[in-house]
Amino acid sequence: MIKWKEPRTEKIPLTQKWALIYQIWNRNFLQFKRFWVISLLWILIEPLFILGAIGYGLGSFVSTINGVSYIVFFFPALICTSSMFISYFVSTYDNFSKLNFQKLFTSQMTTAIEPQEIVLGEILWATTKGAMSAVGVSVIASFFGLVDSWRIFPALGVIVISCLFFSCFGLLITTFVKNYDQIIYPSSGLIIPMSLFSGTYFPIENLPFGLKYFAYIFPLTHSVRMVRGLLSTGFDYWMILNLAYLLILIYILIKWCSIRLANKILN
Amino acid sequence: MKTIVEAKGIVKRYGEKNVVDGIDFEVSRGEIFGLLGPNGAGKSSVMKMMYGASAISEGELFVIGLNAKKNFREIKSRVGVIPQEDGLDEEFTVFENLMLYAGYQLIDKNVARPRAEDLLRLMHLEDHRDKFIPELSGGLRRRLTIARGMINNPEVLFLDEPTAGLDPDIRLWVWEFLEKIRAEMGTVVLTTHYMEEAERLCDRVAILENGKILALGAPAQLILSKIGAEVVELKVEQKDLGYYLERLKENNFRYQVVGSSINVHLDEGQNNQDVLSLVFSRQVTIRRPNLNDVFLRLAGHNLRGEPV
């Protein structure tokens, strides 16, 4: 039976609600802090390898793309994609364990905390980790002269929104899957194709048939378009639509996650 | 406020099935109240509704004077919960676990820190303060879970199977601890499937089976009224059973057949020698009645769910 409503809600002052959300976020932050060197290395090393291998290695065979060097074309997509992976995987694997093995959510629920705060706290944490990776990669890229403008700041703002979406999506997946192995289906079926065909490695205009319109379903297409616009091709008003698309999806997913998780842990 | 919990016809429904099927009870301040029953009787479901971990399908439930359907958040921040699955945070130490939970209850750090230290002392956990959860034994985990449930200075403690799966010495420690708690701070509500636990600890018990309350009252009172003063267990041959039952009936003895034995329930003033002269048995046990006898009489099978 599909339930479209949270089993119960109790209004509390917003300050109190955010204090509780912060507690959930902070628990994850304290855990991260303990091994922060390793954790940070893990979220930086992969994007940097890809930057080297694809951006500089493979990119050196491409003279220019849309009028810019391949690395300039590729860098905005890289920070979008790698932060997406991190938010998504933190949101799925970590939360799957908390939900099913550690029973952490159930015991957090014995306090003033209700499912909606767990949802928001966990989503914000996964977003934080994704954003951390994008910031780290941008700092390192600035040494290579890839980041040399204040426009990186609004671009990172877009990354946060993008990570929010993938954190929500990951948490939603977590409420559906029965075991770790099942997490691989949405990963291979959706997240990885998205990382390839969202105007990341090549412009979506190069997609055959009408597929370039299809690519606009992918949230990542919108993130990449905005970040690339801010960092290289320039701002245009379509970006407001890109942003709106992501925000609407985020709103729907947060609602959906709250309902799913509440029905799971409250039963 | 004298009444801590007030349940009126509460129902918990999963799909078509009522695991809690319209029950009424009250818990008064200062008592240890037990929900006793075999696994699957619905006691954990009742418990979860009381401490706000489970939505109430039907009926009215008031905890510390608050409506559990509406003010569950305030209830949760003012009661202490010790669930069966402890859900301790494996990534953190004993002390950090207490501090995290203080945070979840929005207790100021400066208030929480001395309180956490006090609780560690109370639970004899000082030596394990900085150990990570995976290093703890089952007994230590349970003690920490109890400490965690008390971090917010609760008005009532809810314990779901507090001694299930624990070694006998730790079980005894928990019992003594709960008796001390009752004397100091008041009310304790627990579920158990151990009749010894219910008899020893509880001022009053509700005996549950299939989501309904079979009997409710003080353990000694229940035993006396439902069973009597003494039980004579007689193992007999199956072929003689009918004959012996007839003789017991003629002499106004109350009895229950349990497998291949007859349990005769004696009232004050009835003599067990009279029973022995009526029934010939090679294996006789004369003992004090207990809550299992009450359950057996009311439900027709043993508390632990063994086939009779």
Image: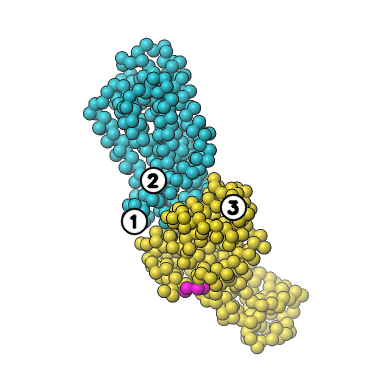
Q: Which residue is mark 3?
A: B129
Q: Residue A120: which disc?
A: 2
Q: Which residues are magenta?
A: B28-33
> Who comes first in sequence, dot 1 or dot 2?
1
Q: Residues within 10 Å of mark 3 (few under 14, many from 20)?
A: some
Residue at the spot x=57%, y=58% of the render? B120
Residue at the spot x=56%, y=49% of the render? B93
Q: Secondary structure at mark 1?
A: loop
Does residue B31 show up magenta in the picture? yes
Chain letter of the residue beneath label 1 in the structure image: A
* CA separation in Å, label 1 and label 3: 34 Å
Residue at the spot x=46%, y=19% of the render? A52
In the image, residue A260 lies at what x, y percent? Answer: 40, 48
Q: Which residue is mark 1?
A: A12
Q: Amino acid at mark 3?
A: Arg
Q: Amino acid at mark 2?
A: Leu
In the image, residue A173 lies at what x, y percent? Answer: 43, 40
Q: Residue A206: which disc?
A: none
Give me the chain that's yellow: B
Chain letter of the residue beneath label 2 in the structure image: A
* CA separation in Å, label 3 and label 2: 31 Å
Q: Secondary structure at mark 2?
A: helix
**In the depicted structure, whether residue A148 falls above or below residue B64:** above
Residue closest to the eye, A25 or B61: A25
Q: Furthest-bottom residue in view? A: B269
Name chain A's colour.
Answer: cyan
Does residue A199 show up magenta in the picture? no
* Viewer-nearest of discs 3 and 2: 3
* CA separation in Å, label 1 and label 2: 15 Å
